[in-house]
Amino acid sequence: MDLMQILELIIPAAIFSAAPLIFTALGGVFSERSGVVNIGLEGLMLMGAFTGAVFTVFGEQWGFGAASPWFSFIVAIIVGALFSLLHAVASISFRADQVVSGVALNFLAAGLAVFLVKKIFDAGQTPIIAERIDKSNVPFLSDIPIIGPLFFSHAYYTSYIAIALAFVVWYVIYKTPFGLRLRSVGEHPMAADTMGINVIKMRYIAVMLSGAFAGLGGAVYATSISGSFSHSTITGQGFMALAAMIFGKWHPLGALGAALFFGLAQSLSITGQQIPLLKDIPEVYLLIAPYVLTILALAGLVGRADAPKAIGQPYEKGKGR
Amino acid sequence: MEVLKNKFSGFMIPLVSVILGLLAGAIIMLFSGYDPILAYTALFNGIFSNTYVMGETIRQFTPLILSGLAVAFAFRTGLFNIGVEGQLLVGWLASVYVGLQFDGLTPFLHIPLAILAAAAAGALWGVVPGFLKAKYHVHEVITTIMMNYIALHVVNAIIRSYLLAPGERTETIHQSASLASAYLQSITDFSRLHYGFLVAIIGAIIMWFLLWKTTLGYELRAVGFNTNASQYAGINVSRNIVLSMVISGAFAGVAGSMEGLGTYGYMSILSAFTGIGFDGIAVSLLGANSAIGVVLAAALFGGLKIGALNMQSVAQVPTQLIEIVIALIIFFVASSYLIRWFSNRLNKRGKI
């Protein structure tokens, strides 16, 4: 097996596994940049995966055909944004501990999604969906030698949307007035308030954006990777996305890079058995690599990562910070 | 007045939250076409109707007490230990490993040894986030989440490589290390009740004693109240942060040994987390981080989980309803600001 074949095996698989992580991690960037910790990404992603699977099945029944998963994405974005409102209300308006509220959100999502699946389908999981996201070659780009087959062939549209979206989010957060306000609210909410920025409103928008993104991430996972939803569909992908966001230093492009790297680690643990050099490395090292790297990154061994200054603190008008 | 207020928030908020949570559960059942009265009656019977379910309830909440204590202990020092789940897994494995060794040892030595091994393993898993927090100011929430996944994969790999028996699990531990008891099983109609509940009660007493009757506990609580003031008063904050995570991890490890030495007597290769560690967060929040509160909250959640089984078979309500109720209870406790606000308004109205 030559190098090219190995790369053709690993890289598309990495991009494929990374897509849901990218969406969710980008959502996390919005929320945490505004100063709201979002441990609830896992639960939001879970609701997204549930919605994605359920509404793709419904879409198929309603005759949407190949558009079914795309229809489910829209529903998942809405459901994710609405579900994240719970976290926003508890942690922004009622000043609940943001981590606690996020944990509660995860519990609630896990219970609610499986409860609803049992109610709707009378079974522990949704039917397997027929219309998955298509693989396709990107026109022109896939004809480029070497790069073409590696990055632009037999890939999922959703992966490209994820990568493109990372640049859009970067532009929004760093180059628009909205982004500046979002960041200022997360760094020094009182100063932002003095400048006439509505801190509470900004944080609500940011948390709902994180819900929308995580919902989309979950739906992409359900329609491209798992193909159905059950209690074991989302087991830690949301936390992995959280890790990617931190490893990427709360920066959209950093989160993109980290998510791609984690996707690579995941794809290696699956495809590793077919690759000569990697066959001898026990699977467990590849499985724990993303988590170990995140810890090292946080400890400052892989470049220092600083969280937004006001993260985790509820904002009360007239109370200093 | 101040005392009354404290009593109010200490006792009323959990109580109101539980009632609101169950009410919300009833509303969800109404909307999804189930009979809430039938369901809650079945839930109640599923906890108290016979000795078997009562034995199972106690078995269910035994590890919950310990995982709740683990979370609560770290909370007292201002640390949020989400890593109880991982610490519990390594504790479970360590207890089973010791239980598999030392054939012929007397139970009076073998059981404590296995439990101590579990505590040590959990403590070891707690050291890492504690040290990183103390030394590099890395937020413990993220490191403990990461450590959970590392624990899950490492524990599975160790079982697969070194301890594998037919059925994707380890061998069963020696009788001398087992907490299972023929006597307890016979008086509870052959439930899986084991002596672990005594360990959990002892654990609660140890936590109370450590926190409230020792200098160490005073320092730990001081750090939890105000890091800067403690530092100024000459308390070694870093040392206390590490110690808090170590002790918290030890409680979590012992929670794992309840499964390893009591309920199962072995450890399986796990495809997902047990959930006991995460439930410990709910338990400690509802129990207001006090030893007695944790025991009561664990009993409540353990009972709800066992009762949910009967609720499903009698009223066809999926057991997940109870997970929803528990999540809502946490939301209500966490948003206690809301409950306080309402009660203040009510009080004011009463005065006028």
Image (cartoon, coloured by chain):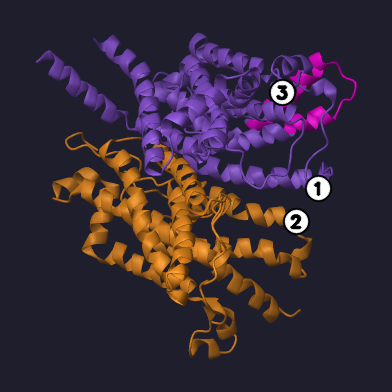
Tell me the tag on residue B97: none
Task: Compare residues A167 and B58 and report the one nearer the observer.
Answer: B58
Q: Is residue B114 magenta?
A: yes
Estimate the spatial distance between the alpha carbons at disc 2 and disc 1, rounded to whole Å.
Answer: 10 Å
Q: For label 2, count other residues whose C-alpha is less than 10 Å away and answer few (under 14), some (14-19) or many (20+).
A: few
Separation (CA) of disc 1 from disc 3? 23 Å
Residue, disc 2: A282
- Is residue B313 in view from this perspective? yes
Label 2's element?
A: loop
Magenta span dominant secondary structure: helix
Of all chains, the one bearing label 1 is B
User: Which residue type does callout 1 highlight?
Assistant: Ser
Measured as percent of width and height from the top left, residue A195 is found at: 14, 50
| Quadrant position of the C terminus of chain A in the picture | top left
The percent position of residue A299, horizontal first and vertical second, equals: 52, 46
Q: Does residue B266 appear left or right of residue B82 in this picture?
A: right
Can you identify the residue that label 3 sits on? Answer: B115
Type of the residue with mark 2: Pro
In the image, is B204 to the left or to the right of B17?
right
On the image, which quarter does residue A287 sit in? bottom right
For the colour purple, the matching chain is B
Image: magenta residue range: B94-122
Confirm whether the magenta stretch covers residue A208: no
Name the residue rendered at 38%, 23% in the picture: B14
- Rendered-image quadrant of the N terminus of chain A: bottom right
> Answer yes or no: do the residues labelled 2 and 1 have beta carbons within 8 Å?
yes
